[in-house]
Image (cartoon, rainbow, N blue to C red):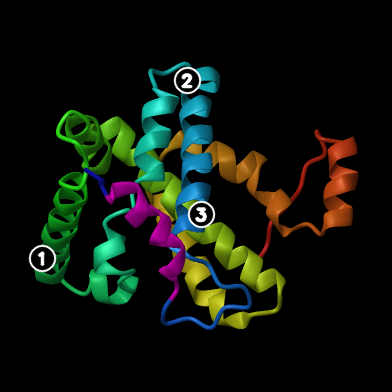
Amino acid sequence: MSYPFFAYLSRMKYIGRWGLMRCTVSENIQEHSHMVAVLAHALAVIRRDHFHRDADPGRVTAAALYHDAPEIFTGDLPTPVKYANNAIRDAYKAVEQNAADRLCAMLPPSLRPAFTNVLSETEPEVVELVKGADKLSAYIKCLEELKAGNREFQSAARQTRTALEALCLPEVDYFLEHFLPAFQLTLDELEEEAQEPDQQLSITL
């Protein structure tokens, strides 16, 4: 018997993000999920190794990698629609859960428990780091679009930065201070920065 779970996951690259926005470079949810996983792993390592708090980078990374998998069936609903009011937000969560359950049903029974846990992560410490990474990924996208001269993302950048700071996660604050400024540099500037990694950068919108 053939199971279509991973074949469906491979189609994430066909689902675009930022549906209401004009982008200079398109982004799909497969690309986004990879970046969120990278950032979530970083946040978990920062929590564990810099702030000396309990964190499981592997678990956090897996949850981040699959966090948008239900959008294979739901599509990427624009944020203003998704969070327009509590009724829509709660209904969409139910739709996402149904999509996650549908995906898990496409696996052999012996594998379903492991992927059910990944697709429906409930551990608060994991969820908050994935959420922080998700917001960071969105903010980085805003900065990249602004760097390309696309003023369409000015408001989104401000709102996302405010949302990041409102999370009150020291791991996110650490990333914003020490890693985010480099995303505004050109390739030549990155090369120069690599030679002087301790140089302090500032970030402006």
Please tell me whether mark 2 or mark 3 is closer to you in this view: 3
What residue is shown at x 88% (from left), y 46% (from top)? 191
Give amino acid for label 3.
Ser
- The residues bearing labels 2 and 3 have C-alpha atoms spaced at a distance of 21 Å
- The residues bearing labels 1 and 3 have C-alpha atoms spaced at a distance of 25 Å
| Residue under pointer 3 | 137
What residue is shown at x 30% (from left), y 69% (from top)? 75
- The residues bearing labels 1 and 2 have C-alpha atoms spaced at a distance of 35 Å
Along the line of sight, the residue nearer the viewer: 38 or 108: 108
Place residue 14 in its image quadrant: bottom left
Q: Is residue 76 above or below residue 19?
A: above
- At label 2, counting other C-alpha atoms closer than 10 Å, the crowd grade (few under 14, some 14-19, many 20 or more) is some
Residue 48 disc label: 2
| Residue under pointer 1 | 91
What residue is shown at x 69% (from left), y 56% (from top)? 203
Give amino acid for label 2.
Arg
The region drawn magenta spans: 4-18
Q: Is residue 170 above or below residue 90?
A: above
Q: Dot 1: what SS? A: helix
Give amino acid for label 1.
Ala
Give the position of the C terminus as an image quadrant: bottom right
Residue 37 place in picture, x, y as percent: 47, 42
What residue is shown at x 23% (from left), y 30% (from top)? 114
Along the line of sight, the residue nearer the viewer: 118 or 88: 118
